[in-house]
Image: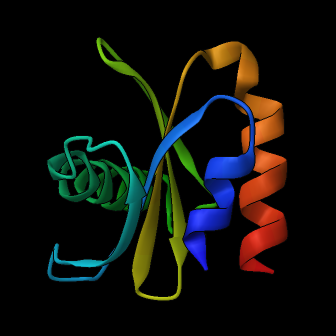
């Protein structure tokens, strides 16, 4: 299912991570999935500070390239891609896949 995201220009790696931090599914070249747990912690902290609300996605611009974290139920889809300029295309492809 998620491997079809690799057909989108610029996407290098995708991984679906469960609530415990385990890999449910992945495709493409590896990327550090530990950012998922850190990203969840940031989102939880921001939700508490802002009085709740659902999160749509979180963009992390890291040394190895940008990573988009997108919630999917109690799981998170990690999408690593080549450059921030590709963000619109990546978001569109992720939303099309998840909905």
Residue 59 in the image: state x and y as whole percent: 52, 35
Residue 61 in the image: state x and y as whole percent: 43, 20
The quadrant in which residue 76 appears is bottom left
Q: Against 70, is 90 above or below?
A: above
Q: Against 25, is 91 above or below?
A: above
Residue 86 in the image: state x and y as whole percent: 73, 23
Total of numbered circles in the picture? Answer: 0
The quadrant in which residue 25 appears is bottom left
Residue at the spot 33% in from the left edge and 62% down from the top edge:
44
Depth check, front residue: 11 or 61: 11
Residue at the spot 66% in from the left edge and 56% down from the top edge:
5
Depth check, front residue: 58 or 67: 67
Which residue is the extreme one toward the bottom?
Answer: 73
Q: Is residue 28 left or right of residue 31?
A: right
Depth check, front residue: 92 or 53: 92
Q: Against 86, is 7 above or below?
A: below
Q: Is residue 95 left or right of residue 10?
A: right
Quadrant assignment for the N terminus: bottom right
Residue at the spot 50% in from the left edge and 64% down from the top edge:
51
Q: Is residue 10 left or right of residue 62?
A: right
Q: How is the rendered protein coloured?
A: rainbow
Q: Against 90, is 74 above or below?
A: below
Q: Is residue 99 left or right of residue 19?
A: right
Quadrant assignment for the C terminus: bottom right
Residue at the spot 71% in from the left edge and 76% down from the top edge:
98
């Amino acid at each position: 299912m998620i491997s079809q995201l690799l057909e989108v220009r610029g996407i290098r790696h995708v991984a679906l991570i469960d609530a415990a931090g385990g890999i449910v599914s992945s495709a493409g070249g590896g990327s550090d999935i530990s950012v998922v747990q850190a990203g969840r912690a940031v989102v939880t902290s921001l939700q508490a500070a802002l009085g709740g609300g659902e999160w749509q996605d979180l963009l992390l611009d890291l040394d190895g390239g940008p990573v988009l974290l997108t919630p999917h139920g109690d799981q998170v889809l990690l999408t690593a891609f080549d450059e921030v300029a590709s963000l619109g295309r990546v978001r569109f492809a992720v939303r099309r896949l998840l909905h």
